[in-house]
Amino acid sequence: MSKILITRPMPKAVEDRARSMGDVTFRKETTPMSATEMVSALHEFDVVLPTLGDQFSAQIFDQVDAPRVRLLANFGVGYNHIDVVAAKSKGIMVTNTPGAVTDATADIAMSLMLMTARRAGEGERMVRAGLWEGWHPTQMLGLHISGKTVAIIGMGRIGQAIARRCHFGFGMKVVYASRSAKELDFPAEQCLNITEAAARADVVMVAVPGGADTKHLINAAVFDAMQNHAVFVNIARGDVVDESALIAALQNGAIGGAGLDVYEFEPKVPSELIALENVTLFPHLGTASLEVRTGMGNMALDNINAFVTGQTPPNLV
């Protein structure tokens, strides 16, 4: 019977199903694994189900000459916290959970766009603080979204789901920057590069994978290209954005606002961002619904089940 480690608490349905699949250990902490825990896990288990923050880096794998683990079944579509090349060099497969997160993440992107453009967070803080003095015609005027232009940076599953919502829901014109042209069921124009897309848009949405190839993909040059009323939204990975450049752009009025679900040094959020009224800050809510997290867990367990029954896991990366 395979020994399986699940590194964070999961929805009850996922934990109940996992118990039927082998000798399962449930780690009770909600925080990321320490280096010591990760090295021990590679020695002691056949399968580990890690998630965001469990930094299985090359340095971790280098500490284990002959790991017992043969599968890291990641809980999440993003896997930039796992050095896949180093894992494979040790004979360890890596899987993820694509598809299960798409709609939920796109919905959060829309929430961030609307809250930032219409100054909803600022308004709620005003009401809670007892500072609202009543309606008047020029109070808290924000950016009207309908009919505006949105730039999608990264037109994969999530980027397309965001673009579809923008087009069909708000009549927005869609431009995008992507490595390849996409066949879409709605009108969208591919731009030559990110800065061109950013310059044309009222809202810029980032939906690229994390990893070394996309670190600081969104930098000062992109913010300089944006219009000074434009809203920036990131639901990708925190280090895709040069956070210091974003803070500078917000502070000097180069852009109109930002909606963020992820942060470069998560869970640390810079005090400069917290101090700004034109920023909406979410605690990484992208997939935070019971239905979606259960779906993600079951997809991870599908990968594990295939492995322990001698089949190829369906979501190898």
Image: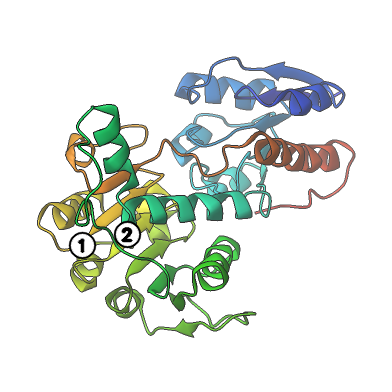
- Mark 1 sits on what residue? 255
- Mark 2 sits on what residue? 232
Residue 230 at x, y = what percent? Answer: 27, 66
State the image quarter where residue 212 is shown: bottom left
Marks 2 and 1: in contact by CB < 8 Å? Answer: yes
Kind of residue at badge 1: Ile
The residue nearer to you, when weighing 227 against 147, is 147
SS category of the residue bearing label 1: loop
Which dot marks residue 303? none
Residue at 33 percent across and 52 percent down: it is: 116
Kind of residue at badge 2: Phe
Does residue 74 lie above or below 167 as drawn?
above
Dot placed on the residue nearer the N-terminal end, 1 or 2: 2
Does residue 63 lie above or below 78 as drawn?
above
Does residue 78 lie above or below 63 as drawn?
below
Structural distance between the alpha carbons of marks 1 and 2: 8 Å
Residue 181 at x, y = what percent? Answer: 54, 83
